[in-house]
Amino acid sequence: MAADLTGRSNTVAEATTKAPVRLLVNGQPYELLVPVHRTLLETLREDLQLTGTKHGCEVGECGMCTVLLDGEPVLSCLTLTVEVEGRTVTTVEGLERGGELHPLQKAFAQMGATQCGYCTPAMLLTAKSLLDRSPSPSEDEIREALSGVLCRCTGYIKIIAAVEMAARQMGAPDSVA
Amino acid sequence: MLRLPRFQYVRPSSLREAVSALADCGPQAMPVAGGTDVYPKMKRRQFLPRYLVSLQGVPELKGIRGDERAGLVIGAGCTLTEVASHPVVRRFYPGLAKAIESISTPVLRNMGTIGGNLCLDTRCNYYDQTLPWRAALGWCMKAPDPGGWPMAPEAAPAENQVPCRVAPGSPRCWAVASSDGAPALMALGAQARLVGPRGERVVPVGELYRDDGMFFLEKSQAELVAEVLLPPADGTRSTYWKLRRRGAFDFPVLGVAVALSLDTDGRVAWARLAVTGVASRPLLMDEAARLLVGQKPSPELVEAVAQAVYLPVRPLDNTDFAHYYRKRMAGVYVRRALQELLGPAAAA
């Protein structure tokens, strides 16, 4: 922060309304010039056309817009894009590998763990972060981890079962469910 | 999309820069750490800061130092997840871990900070609503119009005065203290280190608060909560009981924090009891806690302490659940918290 001739910092002059940002989204580097009031949710959906990340309440109550920031789930509706400078973002589009679905995606499809599908991206990413940290979680751990993502149609039972199924398959990749 | 209003962004890279940024930008500036309280309120036009001073790049606010013997120093910028998962917090300050784990949800705890939770805005049924809802009502004292969030008492011109919708004849706002971290830290005897343009000071956490729904923080606009200081654990037992509508995700409509220790012959050596959700600031219940000191646990003792909390607390009808139920539950939760800490001798 610069100081003027009196030695006093002059913050007001340095306050910005736009800033350049470099970020890595699903392994792809981006350099953007964004207004400071733009949220990561807006940047992902409207600038990068990654519409897999859903917008729900947009005030931190529903969890629909969850993405992984350096592997940890955060709400993209309450994250300024400028604050993601130099960090790694994973959205639901980044779960597949070379056309192969992530085991969680397969398990959700097999178990029928979706109905309208609106919460599914957030459920998948939150579950991925859990399984990366704790490969064979208990049912309580799964419930706790997913407690910030609301689903209004499934009743959660199949979602929890799908996460358990994916955990088993990821622990023993050759076995058939 | 519900979008953020425009603002100018300042990103200081040290605590000193952050404090001088807040001082330079004046009362139209707000600090923001995790953003989980600030951004929703900006989207609903309850906060309209001209400048946002981001604390994310301030290294002095990060990290947890110390141990249970010397006491813990928790940087105000530590996320709630970091605090609640810290092994020393979990083992020696379980009341704090329990309180922090009860805040919102795992994903929000990855973002929200302990300093932010201490400075959490007060809540009210007439205030925590969408912009159209509040407009239809004709606003309220705490958020008179979308342009007029008062950062300081002098910033609210008299012509903007709108009555408090809870108590229309009242000269003050009655919004309710809703931080879970604050009562837990008060019961544990924690202090906060504040850093401002004129230097720094250390105050007990309870002295951060004023009994006013609008001007609920006893700190100047450019002062920042930099650290939370926990005293040595030294045999302290602690817990936190929280009343809320949904077990998975809700603000407290009542929170009871108790910390105490027993001496060698099983008498209570000291005790502190803090209650939130019943006033515009969290309350330290000194008289109730004094009843415990020097006594051996018994059901009668627990009942007397529960009564000493139940009788004076006066929750208002401005959050979830009926206020008389919340008042009654204050006694019930004190009893349950004490039974948890004092074991079978205290059970009825």
Image (spheres, coloured by chain):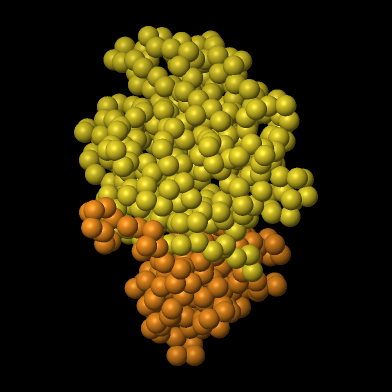
Q: Position of residue B345 (x, y in %)?
A: 46, 16
Residue B341: quarter of image: top left
Q: Position of residue A40 (x, y in %)?
A: 50, 70
Q: Colour of chain B?
A: yellow
Farthest-out residue, bottom: A99
Q: Colour of chain A?
A: orange
Which residue is at the front of the view, A169 or B237? B237
Up-down relation of residue B265 to residue A19 (above or below): above
Query: What residue do we see at 22% from left, 40% from top?
Result: B66
Query: What residue do we see at 31% from left, 15% from top?
Result: B263
Left or right side of B188 for A4: left
Q: Position of residue B312 (x, y in %)?
A: 59, 16
Farthest-out residue, front: A5
Q: Position of residue B314 (x, y in %)?
A: 63, 22
Label total for image: 0
Instruction: For residue A168, say whether it is visible.
Output: no
Query: What residue do we see at 44% from left, 86% from top?
Result: A97
Left or right side of B162 for B47: left
